[in-house]
Image: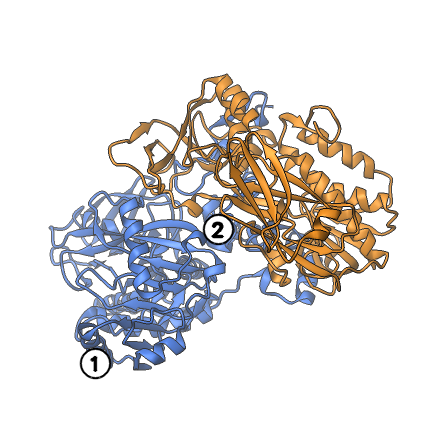
Chain colours: A orange, B blue
Amino acid sequence: MYDVIIIGGGPAGLASAKACLDKGLEKVLIVERDKELGGILNQCIHNGFGLHMFKEELTGPEFAGRFIDMLRDTKVEVMLDTMVLSIEDDHTVHVINTVNGYQCLKAKSIILAMGCRERTRGAIAIPGTRAAGVFTAGTAQRYMNIDGYMVGKRVVILGSGDIGLIMARRMTLEGAKVLACVEINPYSGGLARNIKQCLEDFNIPLYLSHTITDIRGENRVEGVTVSKVDGHFQPIKGTEMYFDCDTVLLSVGLIPENELSKAANIRIDPRTRGPVVYENMETSAEGIFACGNVVHVHDLADNVALEAKKAGESAAEYVSGLRRADKKVVEIKTLPGVGYTVPQHVRVPLDNKFVEVFFRVNRVFGNSVILVKDEKDNVISQFKREFIVPGSMEKIIIPKVMLEKAEGNLTVSVKED
Amino acid sequence: MYDVVIIGGGIVGSSVAYYLSKYQLKTVLLEADNDISNGTTKANSAIIHAGYDPEEGTLMAFHNVRGARLAKELCAKLDVPYKQCGAMVIGFDEDDEKMVHTLYERGLANGVEGLEILDGKTVQKLEPCVSDKVTCALLAKTSAIVSPWEYALALAETAVRNGVEVKLNNRVTAISRNGEAFTVTTVKGKYECRYIINCAGLYADKVHQMIGEKEFKIIPSRGQYYLLDKAEGRRVSRTVFQCPTKDGKGVLVSPTVHGNLIVGPDAEDNDDFSVATTTEGLNFVRNASKKSIPTVDFRENIRNFAGVRAKSDRPDFILEESRSVKNFYNIAGIKSPGLSSAPSLALEAVQWLRSKGEQLKEKDNFIDERKRIRFKELSGEEKQELIRKEPAYGRVICRCETITEGEILNALRTPIPAVSIDGVKRRCNAGMGRCQGGFCSERVAEILMKELHLDGLEVLQDKEGSNVLVDYSKGGSSNV
């Protein structure tokens, strides 16, 4: 019997394992499907990781390496090249690998840290041929940074998510010509620093409110048509531009990978597509916690690691016998402009002195105030911001004393000045 | 000298190869592409129709009904995913009700079993997601869904096991006659034979005219589709058609044997054979489907595709000896219900040879079975046992569909091995899931390189020329 089984050995899994270890758990197991720990960080060879956590600029593999080093020669067990086939709410984990075959493992607690997957061409129904040369940015990144191949020479990037932006720079440095980055929204979905460092510094044009309306080429991509879109994201006739390219990279969003969670009947939030969690990262299934991109898509690996720490500590508390199930639940609701919150639920009275609430907006806000209100329309907390963009996660901290004054459920909204 | 050359490796050519492989004949199937089932066969609604659609007395009616019965047996024997889920043709007004009755009568005349006319309420009860504006429907219990590419592959593989040669990448460029024999020239070589069965689908007219007179013309007609994630796979439990129009059976919404939901097609003549999707076509399909099932969540779409129907300038299937060339047979103009009819059409080819006095002695050792390992369908004990014997089954390569390395290796070792990433997908479903190969295609590429001794730059997504990688990165990979 394990104390905790952690599913996934990326930044969330590693950081939660570290937290379990620090809290004194004896039997911690990380199950990782790849042949090494680190997850997607291994292909993120650019720097910018660790600024918050380690106060220095690390590459993805270095960032993962810090955690791997902390777990080295500890009691934390790792099963590599191992796939979790299913989990059950009695905390049984079914796994397979080539060495031990099929096994049922038991644990007192489980941490879900499966990360996310990329949205594909199908998800946005881009018309055109089925030619080779259409990649999600992450797949292209793996071919390039792990395997050492160029996926194309003349590239158009659809979507301005961070991986797409990073790949624009990466492909340029490798000698490819990145012709354009095309974003259907009137704003970028990526970090401002990536727009600057990956597009502007290399004179790659960013077309906001544009999308790809046709992909040509019988066997390999030969070109794409890009059109401007109206306020309803519909292409505007007469605005077509043709780009002669052999490759399309898609950076059109990430989806938390929750097939295991859904099969275990864990409640999923349709907005985040991740598990609904309480303030301690516990899911709707008692003793099953979740952290990182499996819960909601983060902007920075540092934030993933911080959330994972919380999940690891909570799992350790659970293993040591602390139960919160009979506490009162306060729901955090969102008003238009706010896409979601994590946690979605808070159990009161809080054990901590405050609760951290993360969220993303779904449009750009200038000078504004974030309002947390209760059912009686009392303002529980408010936070001033000069700028809030969808590309960055927003964090607010609600003190316990304020939360205790609230009546009923809470709402989070943003009011522009 | 071959007895028979089959031109085309779609569902029709594969069926012909299968049935001829029962007999002591020397047969070769020539396919232009690098895989079986890589044209119209892989891109359609994947339905084995019950047979109420074609008008009584047509070749389509006869072969649909007989072919559908054969399909059920063949799929069971050859381990092809097949499910008799039934179908409904729904109606919204009086005209539709007339049509539903017409189809019912036609079905009875064609010998279709399991037909019923339902009222709107019963439709709602059976399929709660169907629009509440439905007033009636034809229920066809024998309608089925199938994996069309696996169906063709299974038939062709079985033919190969029984001695038929399958030559891929052999586009036919010329056909000539010397005495009683034909010489079929392809881009790779020459094949002498006594009979030719033309199953060249979209190119059947061109192949025929390499030696014969112009007797028919193929009029390609494109249909576009949405394929949705398994999250939407239970939106309906039967295939739901709208009433047919002159353009075809209209937009359907159906479960697939793989657990997804398929929505389509439209119909549009396109002379360039293009399988590109278009904004207009996809919008049409989406909007038309809302009439039947208003609640399909298109955000769960995982793939769009288009297929091209090989319609001809004749209203019925073309199933005959060429009028201008003896011993040259055409199975052409095989539009819908072609997939349903295929084995029955192939039986016709056997009859043709008999009618020419061929003895057609049956082989003693004919292999009439096929089994494929589907890891995720096994019990825990079976999984354990399999991995113990063959550890490659312990490594999951495609996460979305839980496809193991062992299954991918099998796809590369079948009688007609995969040569591309999509070839692997067609044989074992790797890359068919919600991430559409985003995660596993790179791993599959790696296995292809290792097993087929390919350089990375030679790895194909699908057809010749669909290379995935274009160069090495600086200091990258195999120029080491």
- Seen in the picture, residue B52 relative to B430 is either above or below; the reply is below
With B250 as the anchor, is A148 left or right in this view?
Answer: right
The residue that appears at 63% across and 43% down in the rendered structure is A358
Q: Can residue B3 be seen in this view?
A: no
Q: Can residue A204 be seen in this view?
A: yes
- Seen in the picture, residue A59 relative to A12 is either above or below; the reply is above
- Mark 2 or 1: in front is 1
Marks 2/1: CA–CA distance:
41 Å
Q: Badge 2 local density, few (<14 within 10 Å), some, or many (20+)?
A: many
With B413 as the anchor, is B179 left or right in this view?
Answer: left
Residue type highlighted by circle 2 = Lys
Task: Identify the residue under disc 2.
Answer: B425
**Chain at numbered mark 1:** B
Determine which of the numbered discs, if any, sits on residue A255 in the image: none
With A373 as the anchor, is B463 left or right in this view?
Answer: left
Residue type highlighted by circle 1 = Glu
The residue that appears at 45% across and 54% down in the rendered structure is B300
Looking at the image, how many numbered discs can be counted on the residues?
Answer: 2
Residue A241: image quadrant is top left
Task: Identify the residue under disc 1.
Answer: B105
Residue closest to the eye, B448 or A314: A314
Pinpoint residue B377: horizontal percent, then vertical percent.
58, 65
Residue closest to the eye, A66 or B219: A66
Q: Are marks 2 and 1 in contact (CB under 8 Å)?
A: no
- Seen in the picture, residue B386 relative to A72 is either above or below; the reply is below
SS type, badge 2: helix
| Quadrant in the picture for the N terminus of chain A | bottom right
- Looking at the image, is mark 2 or mark 1 earlier in the sequence? 1
Pinpoint residue B172: horizontal percent, then vertical percent.
27, 44
Residue closest to the eye, B356 or B228: B228
